[in-house]
Image: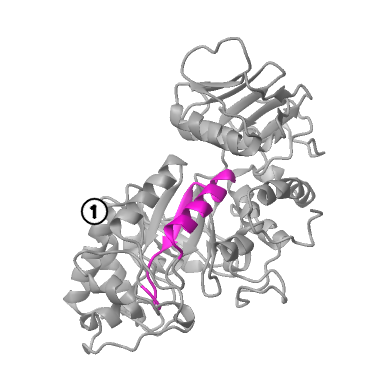
Amino acid sequence: MALPYLLTAALIATPVPVLSAEPAFDVIPAPVSAVATGADFHLDRTTVIQTRTPAVGSLLAADLREATGLTIPVTPSAAPAGRKISLKITGGLGDGYRIAVDRSAVEIKASTPEGLFDGTQTLLQLRDGRAIAGGTIADRPRFTYRGSHLDLARHFHAPDEVKKYIDEIRRLKINYLHLHLSDDQGWRIQIDGWPRLTEIGGAEGTGVDGVGGGFLTKAQYTDLVDYAAARFVTIVPEIDMPGHVNAAQVAYPELTCDGVAPPPRTDTAVGYSSLCISSETTYRFVEDVIRELAAITPGPYIHIGGDEAHATPPADYVRFQDRVIPLVAKYGKTAYGWNEIAQSTAAYSSVAQYWGTTNNNPVLAGAVAHGMRVVMSPANKAYLDMKYDRNTRLGLTWAGLIEVRTAYDWDPGTHLTGVPESSVLGVEAALWSETLRSIDDIEFMAFPRLAAIAELGWSPAATHDWESFRTRLAAYGPQWTARGVDFYRSPQVSW
């Protein structure tokens, strides 16, 4: 399991303790520090999981049962004679964790339940059959926000598909799932005050090419939020505006300036729709949607879109954001939008998602100088709907071809001029659904590139090494295969 990349004490961030620079394990994302000893722990029918954090212990037991066939009890008390996996909450580790494995026991320590869960995800990667590789790992995330985005608007993906995706992304320590819930082709979330949004915008025949209709009821959305939260993933809902609103205007013509409903759209064009910026109906609609979404979203963010609003005059765009961004705060959430929102001074306390393809955005850099934080999603690096190569059966090409190395070889902390790492909240890999129809399509386009983005978000910059990553990725491939994940077997990796 060992591989030859070296980690030095300089990589260790307080309060994670320093371990000696020895070969690490085949772990993705790369840990801050790891030492392999060869003193492996063997799971057997006497093994127990001892923890006072039963939710984390039960998830680990379920994963081990699926992988090994062993039913491992979870107990809060001292284990009887036998083999013990100990999960402990302790102070001094910040948002990180520590793992120690020897022949007699496994111990994971963290200061938070999420840190403990992160440790269990690493532990699962140390497993080979019923053996867990011996050694020590000290680890913590580089960035607070490590996101994955999934478009439900261009093609609706059912809750069970989203749950399967959550199961996979969290294994890579992704902790935010951004759901794109509205666009020109469809509206995918129930809003009680505006029922025709889903009656019409979520009907059969909506979506690109007229396929992929459907929507989430509030109960289904809440169930997804709870399912994700149990795995320490926070849902970020997005309602795109003032552009990308054709489906809403088909349902409610009063959201147009002339009161006439536009025809439904099932193509992939962008930039042609806009809310009526001068109409008070627009702001009543927007506030109702934000209020209802905020009430069922326990996470801190409401994403208000803001991209490709070509049909909205620039002055109107700023006027719109100046009114809408404070509405998000009114309902207890932080506004989050595509980087175009940085044109509004009201957005300085918000989060901007950078999706451009250049290394320079003066407007965003200016907003950052006033306190705005940024999530990095450059389309030519982190858009998972781009084709891997010209022959890829799915995907688009407008931002370029993105093979695994392209997704890996960039640094979110230095990518954009005028945006220092201290202003970068994290990274997010976006997956748009124009060409996707099934969970297999989602997995094929997301994996293995999402693993690359996950490592950029989690691992110290000094561990960034393509040869190391491609070796560890090859070692991870059999885990996807065992779980039935339809990943792309990139020729850049020796699977």
Which residue does the image show at 68% across and 32% down from the upper left?
Answer: 33
- Residue 124, by quadrant, is top right
| The one of 466 and 350 positioned closer to us in this rendering | 466
Q: Which residues are magenta?
A: 157-186
User: Does any portion of residue 90 appear in the rendered image?
Assistant: no
Q: Is residue 115 magenta?
A: no
In this rendering, position of residue 99 left or right of residue 390: left
Residue 173, x across and y down, in percent: 56, 44
Q: Is residue 165 magenta?
A: yes
Seen from this angle, which residue lies furthest top? 81
- Residue 238, by quadrant, is bottom left
Which residue does the image show at 48% across and 35% down from the upper left?
Answer: 114
Residue 111, x across and y down, in percent: 48, 26
SS assignment at label 1: loop
Which amino acid type is marked by label 1?
Tyr
In this rendering, position of residue 383 left or right of residue 210: right
Which residue does the image show at 44% across and 31% down from the upper left?
Answer: 55
Label 1: few (<14), some (14–19) or many (≥20) C-alpha neighbours in 10 Å: some
- Residue 270, by quadrant, is bottom left
Which quadrant holds the N terminus? top right
| The one of 400 and 196 positioned closer to us in this rendering | 196
Residue 212, x across and y down, in percent: 45, 73
User: Does any portion of residue 255 appear in the rendered image?
Assistant: yes
> What residue is shown with label 1?
331
Report the number of numbered marks.
1
Q: Is residue 383 above or below residue 456?
A: below
In this rendering, position of residue 171 left or right of residue 102: left
Q: Is residue 193 above or below residue 71?
A: below
| The one of 124 and 21 positioned closer to us in this rendering | 124
Q: Is residue 280 above or below residue 289?
A: below
